[in-house]
Image: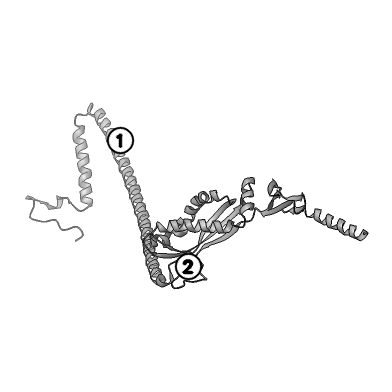
Amino acid sequence: MLRLRSLLLAALILWFMTGIYQIRADERAVVRRFGAVVARPGPGLWIGWPWGIDRVDRIRVRTVRQLDVGYDPSAGDDAGFTPVGQLLTGDQNHVNLKLVVEYAIDERDGELDDYVANRLMVDELLRRETEAAMAEWVAGQTVDAVLLTSRAALPPWLMARLPERLAPLRLGLSLQRVSVDYLAAPTEVRDAFEAVNQAQTAIRTRINQAEQESTVRLREAEATRFRAQEQAEAYRREKHALAAADAESFQKRFEQYNRLRATNPHILTAIWWEEMGRTLLGLKSRGQIDLLDHHVGSNGLDLTQFLPPKGN
């Protein structure tokens, strides 16, 4: 009898111990008592009613989960069967598309309750909504647009629209990221699409090279224009300074002439001969004129003799 009591007491202690939970640092818990949520404890020790009365679901809220959606490259394309993720474009072509959806559990109390209530269906519902949304996007594009732009254009489009589609389902999720993991044309036409992609890549490469060359030539032309402007400005400043110096010199001489004219009425003639002398000396130094004194004889100036060229 004593042994039976000991066993019952030990079983009762063990049963009560089922109400003790250690909640880790990256977890939140939802405590349901007879099905109704009564607490949402954070990290630490939680002591509640034992199993059968309380149910404690511990959720790792700081873990990012990944879900593959769409085409599975390892499965291949079976003849007569359209695989999951093979989508129809707006111009009636097929593409194989696989996405990776990353999500976390929303830590807000109501969202956390929704996740716990629907946790067994979360991945399947999220996969179906994502497949429907990406099929909608692909159906509105041409096959070329899908193959060329979907890696950049599709993820932000889905991130903007999936929350609205998921909200009525009350899954308690927080979408983190959507990325394109696999994108290709069906096997039957893959080689043709690869050739088109290579040609388009070559075109883009040529365009980029032409744009780069255009940029280099524009920069060189700009540098040439700048140098020409600098040289023209330097020439202008030099000529302006010379003209200013000449004007100043002339003004001084003109003032001197006005002063001297008051006492010497023939000063203008003297100035004229002085300038003529300088001009003639300059012409002679360049070999453009020569003195005629040695051509003057007893009969006067002999014009039948020609001046020998300078240097002979």
- Where residue 305 sits, quadrant-wise, is bottom left
Q: Residue at position x 93%, y 59% from top?
A: 2
User: In terms of secondary structure, where does tag 1 sit?
Assistant: helix
45 on left or right of 257: right
Residue 121: percent from left, percent from top: 59, 57
Q: Which residue is mark 1?
A: 248
Above or below, 199 against 239 in this view is below
Q: Residue at position x 55%, y 56% from top?
A: 125
204 on left or right of 251: right
- Where residue 221 sits, quadrant-wise, is bottom left
Q: Residues within 10 Å of mark 2 (few under 14, many from 20)?
A: some
**Residue sticking out furthest to the front:** 1
CA separation in Å, label 2 and label 1: 95 Å
Does residue 1 show up?
yes
Q: Relative to the observer, which residue lies in front, 31 or 6?
A: 6
User: In terms of secondary structure, where does tag 2 sit?
Assistant: loop
For the image, the number of numbered tags is: 2
Q: Relative to the observer, which residue lies in front, 76 or 156?
A: 76
Q: In front of the other: label 2 or label 1? A: 2
Q: Relative to the observer, which residue lies in front, 87 or 199?
A: 87
Residue 268: percent from left, percent from top: 20, 33
Q: Amino acid at mark 2?
A: Pro
Residue 67: percent from left, percent from top: 56, 60
Looking at the rendered structure, which numbered label has been put on residue 83? 2
Does residue 39 show up?
no
